[in-house]
Amino acid sequence: MPDQVLYHGETSPENSIITLRNITVRRNGRPILDDVSLDIASGQHTAIIGANGAGKSTLVQIMSEEIHPIWQPQSSRLLFGRDHWNVLELRKRMGIVSQSLQYLCNTTYCARDIVLSGFFSSIGLDFHHQVTSDMQERARVVLVEQGVLHLAGKSMRTLSSGEARRVLLARACVHDPQVMLLDEAVSNLDLPAKRNYREALEAFHREGKTLVLVTHDLSEIIAPIGRVIILKEGKVLADGPKRQVLTEELLGEAYGTAVFLSERDGRFSAWC
């Protein structure tokens, strides 16, 4: 069996934008996350991998304050140096794209309204949402950036998975957030849509956003992502530089089966 943790990173609390200490989450008495601690610094692009049920999505939900850990005297969660946030204010700093969000956004609202709803952390718009001309212009800009302005007036229910995912990327960008939390964002996408998604990640990197990526598809881990965390049964199995963590031995331990690995032009792929 490999060492449980290769590396905790070089991040210090002083330059960390996400600091988790002794975080535990239980569901029906079962630990989903079990005493997890980590730091992520600004610009430290990080991929989180592991088998189904390893706790990956729960970890991202802890980072985004969608869920809260069990209170313990030794546990803490600091986001951008603060332990308490108004969720609307936090969403201005963290853009989120996930399968669950795409499911919630699969409505009759048009793509433009879904993007505008990012200003209010809502799903679509209602009578009490006061949309300004600046918001309208920002929505237009991010739709252009994601190449989906032509879909602005179309119902989300009529879009392909790839089109809907690009609309959600635009929604996540309305506040020009510092961090992008992307949870299984290429799931169910075809090859061209996956390529478009990787190009969006590259653009976020150039814009100086910090990427935190949950994925099963190692090819999604673009070259600028230098750190990989492997979760297993709610614990950190390995955490460190990509080439040290992405090994057949560690992946086999994480997934409970023999895993074969290849690398080409800085991108990895794995199969059983």
Image (tube, rainbow, N blue to C red):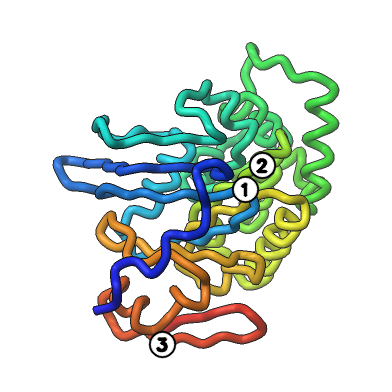
| Secondary structure found at label 2 | loop
Could you tell me if the residues under marks 3 and 1 are in contact, i.e. CB atoms within 8 Å?
no
Q: Amino acid at mark 3?
A: Phe
Q: Is residue 80 depicted above or below 271 in this figure? A: above
| Secondary structure found at label 3 | strand
Crowding around mark 2 (Cα neighbors within 10 Å: few <14, some 14 to 19, many 20+) is many
- The mark that comes first in sequence, 2 or 1, is 1
Residue at mark 2 to residue at mark 1: CA–CA distance: 8 Å
Front residue of 30 and 138: 30
What number is the disc on residue 178? 2
Crowding around mark 1 (Cα neighbors within 10 Å: few <14, some 14 to 19, many 20+) is some
Residue that mark 1 sits on = 42
Image coordinates of residue 149 in percent, x first then y, are 81, 46
Point 77% across, 51% down: residue: 207
Point 33% across, 59% down: residue: 236
Front residue of 215 and 133: 215
Image coordinates of residue 37 in percent, x first then y, are 36, 49
Q: Amino acid at mark 2?
A: Gln
